Amino acid sequence: MAQTRQMPKTAHGPLPSKSAKRHSPGRPPLKPSPDDAEAVARLCDLIISGMSMGQACARNDCPSKTAVYARMAADDAFRTTIARAREAQQHAMIDDTIDLADGATPDNWQVVKLRIWARQWRAAKLAPKVYGTLAEPANAVEANPLALLVQQIQGRALMPVRDDVD
């Protein structure tokens, strides 16, 4: 007859194994701290793979979103680490737009176009130095006499009003 191994017991039940998560039944598991280098590396990997901060922090193996933002506010090095992960995320998302465009069909091209636009917009907001659009100043024509001359020749320029004309 085979003997089964009994778990040691306490007054509150069996002792948890060392590999068990430290949480009470019915309660969510404890999330790692933003001070845990492995958890931060996992968080950065998930961000780079395309997850938003909220999606990545919702996982049990990553720090909570509140803890991450609090640490970003307090620690410049941590903020730089997250910023680099987000920048890499934007590069990856822009690379994915080529695959989206290549996979477009006559039936779904509008949906694909919207997805590409959304990724471009997000990349421009999160990495404006790389993917942002430079707005042309309103007085750019006045600042460039050559452009004004070309527009006059083409008949599109608004001529300045002179007060000294009789």
Image (cartoon, grey):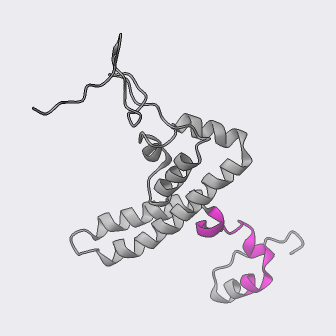
Residue at the left extreme, as displayed? 1
Report the number of discs: 0
Q: At 61% across and 52% down in the image, what residue appears?
A: 82
Quarter assignment of residue 126: bottom right
In the image, residue 52 sits, relative to residue 11, either above or below, namely: below
Residue at the front extreme, as displayed? 1
User: Would you say residue 133 sits in the magenta stretch?
Assistant: yes
Q: At 58% across and 43% down in the image, what residue appears?
A: 36
User: Would you say residue 107 sits in the magenta stretch?
Assistant: no
User: Is 20 or 101 nearer to us in this picture?
Assistant: 20
Q: Where residue 165 appears, x then y in whole percent?
A: 86, 75
Q: Where residue 99 appears, x then y in whole percent?
A: 36, 74
Q: At 68% across and 54% down in the image, what residue appears?
A: 80
User: Is 76 or 35 nearer to us in this picture?
Assistant: 35
Q: Where residue 68 appears, x then y in whole percent?
A: 58, 40
Quadrant for the N terminus in the image = top left
In the image, residue 117 sits, relative to residue 59, either above or below, namely: below
User: Is 18 or 137 nearer to us in this picture?
Assistant: 18
Magenta residue span: 128-149
Q: At 56% across and 57% down in the image, what residue appears?
A: 86
Quarter assignment of residue 81: bottom right
In the image, residue 97 sits, relative to residue 28, either above or below, namely: below
Quadrant for the C terminus in the image = bottom right
Q: In the picture provided, is 45 more to the left or to the right than 146?
A: left
Residue at the top extreme, as displayed? 11
Q: Where residue 164 appears, x then y in whole percent?
A: 90, 72
